Image: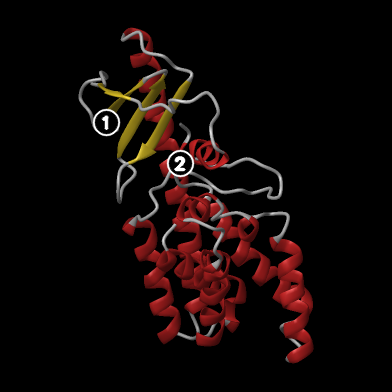
Amino acid sequence: MDSITQAALGATVAGAIAGKRCNAKVLLTGAALGTLPDLDVILDYGDAVQNTIKHRGFSHSLLVLPPFALLISWLYCRWKPDTFWTLSRVFFLTVSVLVTHTLLDAMTTYGTQLIWPFEGYFELRNVFIIDPLYTLPLLVAIGVALFSKSRGGQWCQAVVLISTLYLGWGYASQQIITSRVEQNLMTQSLPNQQVLITPTPFNTLLWRVVVMDDGKYWEGLASVFDNSERIDFVSHPLGSWPLEDKPDTLKGLQAFSHN
């Protein structure tokens, strides 16, 4: 997801956990933690392809983030002891912000290496990488929390629920389209071994459908508001590597792009 959304989600989750203790410092801390996993972009793995492939790797792993959150929390509590913000509370806030970041990324196209160092990208593809309908409520909650000390935490809690329901709607919408796609593949005699169904930019109503096959792929659009069940597909040639052996960079890029 885009950096603004991740920072806004981090701030809102932190505010929701803080409750009546929600204030500007908590929101800023949440925003910083929400951005932290994406700082792996400053690392150079040798070339642009490797930098793209290895993004959302170790810094997004559910095997790395909890112990990292515990370390951050312990250091904070050693530096600034507080009777309310105990180690357990600081850890819960920190790990919640970090984990929600990586789980949100796993809902977008290309997915996330949730169990790095083990291989594999996890993805639901039920939300576009930039979706104002998801981001704007988060920003509203932050704005209210900054100017309403007594109700800021409640607003953050409500918006965390609303934003989660929106992601649930995205998944439900995707399943509606998936059912139509399966019927269309049968009636149009198209292959069904590798099918990608992803939202088009900024919404969860219109979906892009890509059907992969040897040497070609079919592409179509489907909306939850379509009057007809039929999906019109357009065939495109699919390039292939001319040599028998593929370089490791190409193999990684193909795995990343589902090609």
The residue lying furthest to the left in this view is 227
Local secondary structure at mark 2 = loop
Q: Is residue 199 above or below residue 98?
A: above
Quickly name the residue at label 2. Answer: 125
Q: Residue at x 72, y 68 (%)?
A: 68
* Near-viewer residue (113 or 250): 250
Q: State whether residue 79 appears in this view.
A: yes
Q: Residue at x 42, y 43 (%)?
A: 169
Residue 52 percent location from the top left of the image: 48, 53
- The amino acid at mark 2 is Arg
* Near-viewer residue (4 or 55): 55
Query: Mark 2 packing: few (<14 Cα in 10 Å), some, or many (20+)?
Result: many
Report the disc number at residue 221: 1
Q: Quadrant of residue 143?
A: bottom left
Residue 102 percent location from the top left of the image: 57, 56
Q: Is residue 75 above or below residue 13?
A: below
Residue 19 percent location from the top left of the image: 58, 76
* Near-viewer residue (69 or 229): 69
Q: Residue at x 71, y 44 (%)?
A: 118
Q: State whether residue 82 appears in this view.
A: no
Quadrant location of the N terminus in the rendered image: bottom left
220 left or right of 165 in image: left
100 left or right of 125 in image: right
